[in-house]
Image: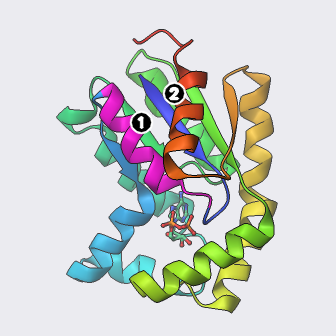
Amino acid sequence: MRLIIMGPPGAGKGTQAKFIAEHFKIPAISTGDIFRANVSEGTPLGVEAKRFMDAGEYVPDEVTNRMVRNRIDEPDAASGFLLDGYPRTVAQVEELDGMIRFTGHQLDAVVCLTVDQDEIVSRLLQRAQVEGRADDTEDVIRRRQDLYLQETAPLIEIYKQRGIVHEIDGIGEVDEVTARIFQALDVIPES
Ligand code: ADP
């Protein structure tokens, strides 16, 4: 099973990704988490990524693509994976297509969480207090929202044309949203 979870920053992708990945026994691969781990370990990748992340900008495609390619090549991802936070640009969509095609598989589904703007801003400001993420300040949140609308929301259309998008209402209790996702995905045969 090869899946993507999409949605604006603050839509709850990371939370839901864990449940979906557990269910299908595949790794949830979050590019944001991998970048943050590299930043805190001070690796060269982390040093490079940090300046973009702190400003709410996307890390350059070639850096991100290489990182995802390496992660997907790991043995635990051989039978499938759930990507959270990737792809975010058209170039990344093409790169991912190539990676999956190379393994002889296909992308099975794209889960799209929909949440309205006001709800998102209040969730992110709340998360800023709890987690203290460097990129959860109001200016940077706004920049991330704008970038999402400009660069990433259009990708949904690309996947819709392939008929693999499941749009899920992301408003409600965490387990309600999970139940909606499972209901939508159960119709998809496991590979
Ligand atoms: P959010 O909650 O805003 O969706 P993430 O944790 O997914 O944030 O990502 C945090 C930051 O990591 C992004 O703002 C960006 O700088 C960087 N990042 C994560 N995934 C990608 C990607 N696919 N392409 C470019 N940059 C990325």
Residue 4 in sight here? yes
The residue sitting at 69% across, 69% down in the picture is: 120
Dividing the picture into quadrants, the one containing residue 94 is top right
Residue 133 in sight here? no
Q: Which mark is residue 20?
A: 1
Residue 63 part of the magenta segment: no
User: What is the x, y in percent for residue 174?
Assistant: 51, 51
Q: Is residue 10 above or below residue 132?
A: above
User: What is the x, y in percent for residue 11?
Assistant: 62, 58
The residue sitting at 67% across, 30% down in the picture is: 166
Dividing the picture into quadrants, the one containing residue 63 is bottom left
Element under disc 2 = helix
Q: In the shown orientation, is residue 55 left or right of residue 82?
A: right
**Residue denoted by label 2:** 182
User: What is the x, y in percent for residue 129?
Assistant: 48, 88
User: What is the x, y in percent for residue 9?
Assistant: 62, 65
The residue sitting at 81% across, 62% down in the picture is: 150
The C terminus: image quadrant:
top left
Q: In the shown orientation, is residue 99 left or right of residue 75?
A: right
